[in-house]
Image (cartoon, helix red, strand yellow):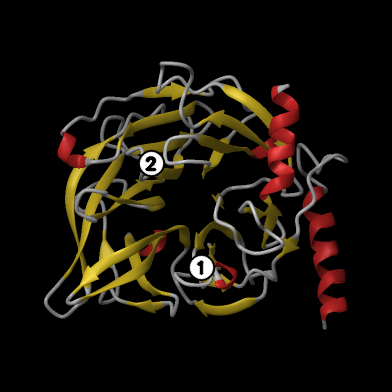
Amino acid sequence: MKIIYKIVLASLLLISCKDKLAPVAKNALKPSIITQPTPHDTDDPAIWIHPTDPKKSLIIGTDKETGGGLYIYDLEGEIVNQFTNMGRPNNVDIAYGLKIGDQKIDIAVTTEREKKRIRIFSLPDLKPIDNGGIEVFESEKDRDPMGISLYTRPSDSAVFAIVGRKFGPSGSYLWQYQLSASENNNITAKLVRKFGAFSQKKEIEAIAVDNEMGFIYCSDEQSGMRKYYADPAKNDNTELAFFGQNNFKSDNEGIAIYKKTDTTGYILVSNQQKNTFVVYTREGSKNKLNEHQKIAEFPTSTIECDGADVTSINLGTRFPDGLFVAMSNGMTFHFYDWRIIQQQIDLQQK
């Protein structure tokens, strides 16, 4: 079966290259693992870290067409669980320790575009805990949810979902909801904030939150990356930075944040039509926290990557400095040993 799978996967990858603007480069970084394919179209991954044994960590990924769903992979890229027959699930993110009654659980939250709602699941069992879903962008003309990221406030462990959509007005393109448990232990969402500029060029799909530093980043496609405060209690919707306007062939999309320490590391953004990732400093430049400069760019084996995630946690001998996961056409996700990416960054900074 594995030999057949590899032949089929190779064929899929070759087909998906044919009509693209930029085929995979000869010097593209090779993944350690390519996952089993989903039935429809992968879009966005999130990494869940096992609380006691990181080698048992999992990757949750979306299969975004009608009838698709969430798929869970082990670190070998094998599908170990799934929740399907959803209405175009788009992006997914993870939060740890949401309080429900007298216990705390980890959750995965995904947008369900056709149903105008978000879905919430407990982890690692992938059980729905949202009483069938929570509607978003209520009373709005444009309601199709796409991007999502979760923010956990360090001071009180409150969990918030920041949700983006296919279309929407500049100034309130993103809506932020606080997640909490209802009396029957299902999760509810309370709207606490509307914010976010929008260029109107294409859409804002990819969103990432830096919990430790308290920032939200979003990809305004064909325009640049926008940065905001994550905590709604600040009552400050100021756009802190708008960077990367001239660094992309067309769409700037998937965002992942590699954390070397609580305040240092990298922001990685998919240069979708070029099949590369652009690297920015997480901590900004010297004495300028909101000045994010391009420091590197590396080619990947992924084709037209929509979404990505990364961790610096040691996940065992194959991924001792962390794991980078990126979506690829061909209905798969590619797993990379962080060390080969760090080598690329180091070489380009010399």
Circle 2 SS class: loop
Q: Secondary structure at mark 1?
A: loop
Look at mark 1 in the image and give the residue it sits on.
66
Real-space CA distance between mark 1 and mark 2, rounded to the nearest whole angstrom: 19 Å
Q: Residue at x 55, y 69 (%)?
A: 58
Which residue type does callout 2 highlight?
Phe
Q: Which mark is residue 167?
A: 2
Q: Does 308 appear above or below 37?
A: above
Quadrant occupied by the C terminus: top right
Query: 241 or 304: which is nearer to us?
Result: 241
Taking 223 as reference, is 132 above or below it? below
Left or right of 68? Residue 184 is left
User: Percent position (x, y) of residue 81?
Assistant: 54, 80
As displayed, is residue 72 above or below residue 221?
below
Disc 2 residue crowd, few under 14, some 14–19, many 20+, Cα 10 Å: some
Outermost left residue: 183
- Which quarter of the image is occupied by the N terminus? bottom right
Q: Residue furthest top?
A: 287
Residue 12 placed where, x, y %?
Answer: 79, 62
Q: Position of residue 189 (x, y in %)?
A: 20, 60
Q: Earlier in the sequence, mark 1 or mark 2?
A: 1
In this view, the residue in front, 93 or 211, is 211
Q: Are marks 1 and 2 in contact (CB under 8 Å)?
A: no
> Could you tell whether 47 is left or right of 250 in the image?
left
At x 43%, y 35%, the residue is 263
Q: Quadrant of residue 2?
A: bottom right
Query: Of the residues shown, which amino acid type is indicated by label 1?
Result: Thr
Coordinates of residue 64 in the picture (x, y in percent): 53, 62
